[in-house]
Amino acid sequence: QIRSKPAGVCGCCGALRPRYKRLVDNIFPEDPEDGLVKVNMEKLTFYALSAPEKLDRIGAYLSERLSRDVARHRYGYVCIAMEALDQLLMACHCQSINLFVESFLTMVRKLLEADKPNLQILGTNSFVKFANIEEDTASYHRSYDFFVSRFSEMCHSSYEDPDVRTKIRMAGIRGLQGVVRKTVRDELQANIWERQHMDKIVPSLLFNLQDPTDSGSPGCEKESPAELTERCFRELLGRAAYGNIKNAIKPVLMHLDNHSLWEGKSFAVRCFKIIMYSIQSQHSHLVIQQLLGHLDANSKSSATVRAGIVEVLSEAAVIEASGSVGPTVLEVFNTLLKQLRLSVDYELTGSCDPYCNNKTTTDQERQLQEAVIKTIGSFANTLPIYQRAEVMLFIMGKIPVPGIYPALGSPIVTERYESSNMLAALPSSFLEPLLSFTLMEDPEIRLLVLSILISLIDRHQNTHKFTFLRSVILSDISVLKLKVDKCSRQDNLFMKKHGQRLYRHIFLTCSEENSGRSHYQALYTLLALLSVELANEEVVVDLIRLALALQDLALANDERLSLYNRCAVHALSAAYLSLISQLTTVPAFCQHIQEVIELRQKEVPYLLPEDIFIENPRIMCVPRVPESLEQVEGEVLFQQFQIAEVLGGSGYNIEILNTPFTPQITDEDRLSKRKSIGDTISLQMDMDPRYNNNPLLSLSHSVDSVNGEEQEREKRRLVVERFQTAPFEEIAAHCGAKSSLLQSKLDQIFELTIRPPPSPSGSASQGQTPTRSVPVYEMKFPDLCVY
């Protein structure tokens, strides 16, 4: 009896234990290798579903057992406890689940804090299963700060064994993915988009995305850490709302800065391709704004860093849908042009930041400038067609006075500008000021404008095919394989509306005395593109008439044109007539042109492009220019009457061909004939006498015969600088003052024109002041009189 009493007491104590504890104890076998006792686990699950108020106690007891087993290194029982917790989580969705979850997260945290990699991976797997469960009730107080920090730390694991290290890193990536899924699904959860969390999550993902030694564990993992990271990163960005984009992108920029990853370009481009393809399309412009702001912040960084950012911008622009640059379109181009101007400054000074002794080289800055120009074109292509002309006009307005920033006159500004509709690509609001720039005295700007026109008109990439023809006349142009489409209705309307203006400006540009070989070659390319892109029968006749008018221009003894210019115009006319004759496929026309060219080759070769447009720099000679052109006559000239006869016989309307082409310089052309675009912009200011009192602009009144040119250039620079750097309020105040002055003048006019009605006696009564009549615009009329 004495021996049996303790046994009886123990039996009684065991029977008195709570039922949930007995059910929990029963799921653990004597040998942990046997695994979870499934029958007893089903009993525990049924009990938890029948008595949900016991869930928190079940969780607390399981947590107590797990902590004890971890301390005693009984890892088999630890795995059984976590498996039981996972099954209970999957089965129970009652309102009491929150208290059970707290116990579950405590146990997961215990495993993640352990030193054993297997326990860390086990805890991560359980957390990922929990993250995929949609809870019926929200938790207002649950925090995931520890899990963000711990999973981020696991992503940077440096464990000695490479296979184990890969497993730990992948567990960390999956853990972060679980945190994101758990928190972004419920607005009442912790805000994972806060900066403190994003600064840990994003760099951890980028670290694994960048690591080249992430081959994974063959046979154990189906994907490498980099592949898993990219999938997780895409999911994170895809869930980002409008207000969260900035916090998600900022850590990416900082990571690329801290690890000098802009210079390599490839990884930075890869990151932002993932970003642009993952975020919602309506948020794309926010990424662009972040990149532009970062580019501004790195204005004094090395050229390779700035070039890397610009390259990323270019790639991002290609990915964007049409118009997704966002509401601040001009801000994009203004920032890029600012960087272009800074790059030119750095190229001239040889330093990005003189205070930090940050040196740069010409090659680096030139590469950056090319990247910026390419990016401007990429952004222009994302815009609707109607906005592209506005952007081009804005860019042209930013070109400063020549000689200060020469690299801004790059002829490839419109390299990526494409449009199938010329009416939309070159509306009057853009074409007219663009053509007016062709009459400026500065030859570099004229060449730039010609290059822009060529890029806009060339829709089939034929420009490079005419490069050879600019110096050599081919007897058979079929070898060029030109792409020629039938002229569309819109093209016909464009030429009907703007054709004569184009011809006129081409003729006037040929009349400029300071044009060089590049100008005439560009004019040839422009004429050739008009022939293959926009020509119908009427346009063909107009172009032939223009070419003959250029021949007459070269024959005229105009003192403005040198002998070289006159020979170059002859060569231009010959080269173009050879091309257009072969495009029209009129045999008699082709024969006449070929006969004249052959005769010129024998007697006056200096009237052909082969002689006058020498391009080989190894040949240190100048074009052969005769002493005079008085003997150029007769058969070495293209005959207008003969060309008209053969074209008329082939069905062309030659009435216009028999009318001389004699364009005159108008007053508008004289106003456009300025020395720079800055002059054109400041033209109105020059005509305002109130600006003459400004000390910055008073230089124009003190120009003498010796320093007049320099002072005029300085005045233009100051005018342009004022409009580019002055605050908006100052410019608006000036415009407001100008409007007020206009209104006061109008009031004076109204006062003079609106007189009081005469009195019956014909004069005002003595001692009475004449009453001022009410102006018409201030009178109050009855309602019946107003409609």
Image (spheres, rainbow, N blue to C red):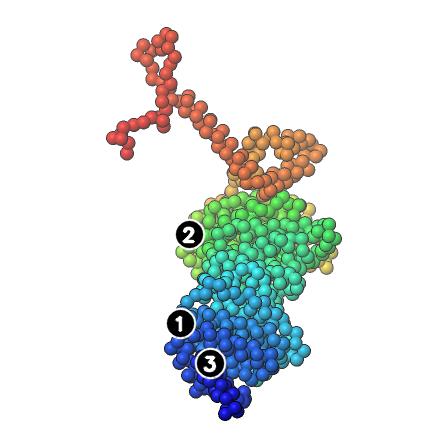
Left-right relation of 765 to 576: left
Q: Which residue lies at the image location 56% right of the left edge and 35% below the top edge?
A: 685
Which residue type does callout 2 highlight? Leu
Q: Choose the circle earlier in sequence order: 2 or 3.
A: 3
Confirm whether residue 116 shows in the render. Answer: yes
Q: Which residue is mark 1?
A: 94
Which residue type does callout 1 highlight? Cys
Q: Residues within 10 Å of mark 1 (few under 14, many from 20)?
A: some
Q: Which mark is residue 493?
A: 2
Q: Nearer the viewer, residue 432 or 144?
A: 144
Q: Nearer the viewer, residue 137 or 134?
A: 137
Residue 659 in picture, x, y percent from top left: 47, 45
User: What is the spatial separation of the Cα atoms under label 3 and label 1, in whole angstroms?
Assistant: 25 Å
Quarter of the C terminus within the rendering: top left
Residue 441: quadrant of the picture: top right
Residue 151 in picture, x, y percent from top left: 57, 70
Q: Which residue is mark 3?
A: 17
